[in-house]
Image (cartoon, rainbow, N blue to C red):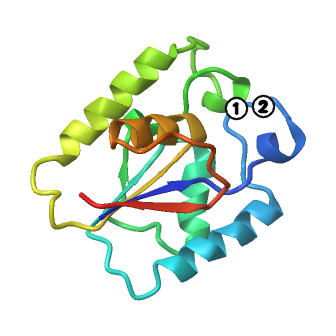
Amino acid sequence: MLYLVRHGESYFNRYGIKEPDPDLTHFGRIQCLKIKEYFKGIHLDVIYCSPLRRAIQTLENSGLYGEGVIVSPLIREKKESACDFHHGEPWIQESEGEVRARCQSFLDSLKDGAADQKILVVSHSTCIKHLMALLGSPPRGQGNCEVLAFPN
């Protein structure tokens, strides 16, 4: 099973503050408890996470971050707004096609041995929409900390 989760509410989501790599809001940290409850009793074989702070904080606040989490730039948000860049990172924007290609590369990397695994991916709205489309599901908006499940 492949689980896709969008990060918790960030300061950019709540207030539109255009600062690099924003933190989760207090409400965003509370939202993470939904993830903790959802995965209670489910053994996850692999956890992948975007390198952006709000995704990592989502895992930390859900109690799922630890040794073995794989931080992958392939599932980071589309480089578009200030919040999609690390502090000091060059501001080079991406096209939708580039994001889709990254998402395809990520899915291709999962194919070996992933059939019987329970895999969690914590990412961002644009990346998740592309992953959904590549998995054959109509892409749609996703709420913060919403869990979507797809058979491998």
Seen at 47% across and 71% down, the residue is 64
Seen at 45% across and 34% down, the residue is 130
Q: Which amino acid type is marked by label 1?
A: Cys
Residue 58 image point, x, y percent: 59, 60
Q: Is residue 80 left or right of residue 59?
A: right
Q: Which amino acid type is marked by label 2?
A: Glu
Q: Residue lying farthest left? A: 112
**Of callouts 1 and 2, which one flags the residue occurring earlier in the amino acid sequence?**
2
- Number of numbered tags placed on the structure image: 2
Q: Which residue is mark 2?
A: 19
Give the SS element for disc 1.
helix
Badges 1 and 2: C-beta atoms under 8 Å apart?
Answer: yes
Residue 116 has which mark?
none
Residue 39 image point, x, y percent: 46, 78
Residue 83 has which mark?
1
Front one among 87 and 104: 104
Q: Quadrant of the C terminus?
A: bottom left
Q: Is residue 64 left or right of residue 142?
A: left
Neighbor class of circle 1 (other Cα within 10 Å; few <14, some 14-19, many 20+) is many
Residue 21 image point, x, y percent: 67, 37
Q: Is residue 117 left or right of residue 14?
A: left
Neighbor class of circle 2 (other Cα within 10 Å; few <14, some 14-19, many 20+) is some
